[in-house]
Image (cartoon, rainbow, N blue to C red):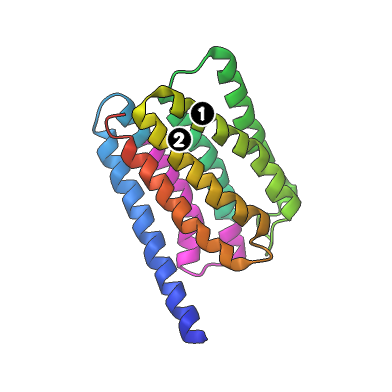
């Protein structure tokens, strides 16, 4: 059993390192391009930096406090990621206000002390609460990309996959830890979004 756990731990570490490296490298290449690709590049770097705060402590088997603080940072940067990529699609001014309001509510909820990020476990009620505006933001982003262009439809699908994998972890992973494996396709969906940023 210990060997299996050790193997899974190594596999998780290798995947996390590959994911962060891919996000950084793709981001750097995107930044070297013009137009919307540059915007996606900025989003990629923000995403990779934020996820580094979350994943590096896991890779190094850091303390619960370090992991919790990393989750808090990643929760904020994931929100910023969507705000940035939404700059590449057409959006009516009233909807802009809704998008920024949802992002602000999400970030404020993430920063509330009731989340107890530095504790061994964050209260599930707050995990659900802070993800309500984030999910609404994701739905709006998916719809706007779907309405934008052919490539936008592909980004919409990737956003849908990311949330379809992320929400079960938020809702039920405390009962079924193996659901945490869904974070792998969720991360791959983010990489797909970044790759689709080339020439969008």
Would you say 36 lies left or right of 99 here? left
- Which one is in front, 27 or 146? 146
Q: Is residue 125 above or below residue 58?
A: above
Would you say 194 lies left or right of 81 here? left
> What residue appears at the point 44 percent right and 44 percent down from the top-left corner?
47
Judging from the image, what secondary structure is the residue with disc 1 in?
helix
> What residue appears at the point 44 percent right and 24 percent down from the top-left corner?
87
Distance from Cα at disc 1 to Cα at disc 2: 7 Å
Marks 1/2 in contact by CB < 8 Å: the verdict is yes
Residue extent of the magenta highlight? 42-68
Judging from the image, what secondary structure is the residue with disc 2 in?
helix
Q: Position of residue 28 (x, y in %)?
A: 28, 41
Residue 59 belongs to magenta span:
yes
> What residue appears at the point 24 percent right and 33 percent down from the top-left corner?
32
- Please, what is the dominant secondary structure of the magenta stretch? helix
- Which one is in front, 67 or 26? 26
Residue 156, label in figure? 2
Q: Compare marks 1 and 2 and give the one earlier in the sequence.
A: 1
Residue 104, label in figure? none
């Amino acid at each position: 059993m210990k060997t299996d756990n050790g193997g899974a731990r190594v596999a998780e570490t290798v995947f996390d390192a590959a994911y962060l490296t891919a996000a950084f490298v793709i981001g750097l290449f995107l930044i070297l391009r013009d137009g919307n690709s540059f915007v996606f590049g900025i989003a990629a770097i923000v995403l990779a930096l934020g996820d580094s705060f979350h994943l590096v402590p896991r890779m190094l088997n850091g303390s619960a406090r370090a992991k919790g603080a990393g989750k808090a940072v990643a929760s904020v940067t994931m929100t910023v990621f969507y705000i940035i990529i939404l700059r590449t699609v057409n959006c009516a001014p009233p909807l802009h206000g809704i998008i920024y309001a949802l992002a602000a509510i999400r970030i404020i909820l993430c920063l509330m002390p009731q989340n107890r990020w530095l504790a061994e476990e964050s209260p599930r009620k707050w995990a659900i609460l802070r993800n309500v505006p984030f999910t609404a933001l994701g739905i709006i982003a998916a719809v706007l990309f779907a309405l934008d262009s052919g490539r936008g439809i592909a980004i919409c699908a990737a956003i849908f996959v990311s949330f379809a994998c992320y929400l079960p972890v938020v809702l039920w992973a405390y009962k079924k830890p193996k659901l945490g494996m869904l974070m792998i396709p969720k991360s791959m969906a983010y990489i797909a979004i970044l790759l689709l940023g080339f020439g969008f």
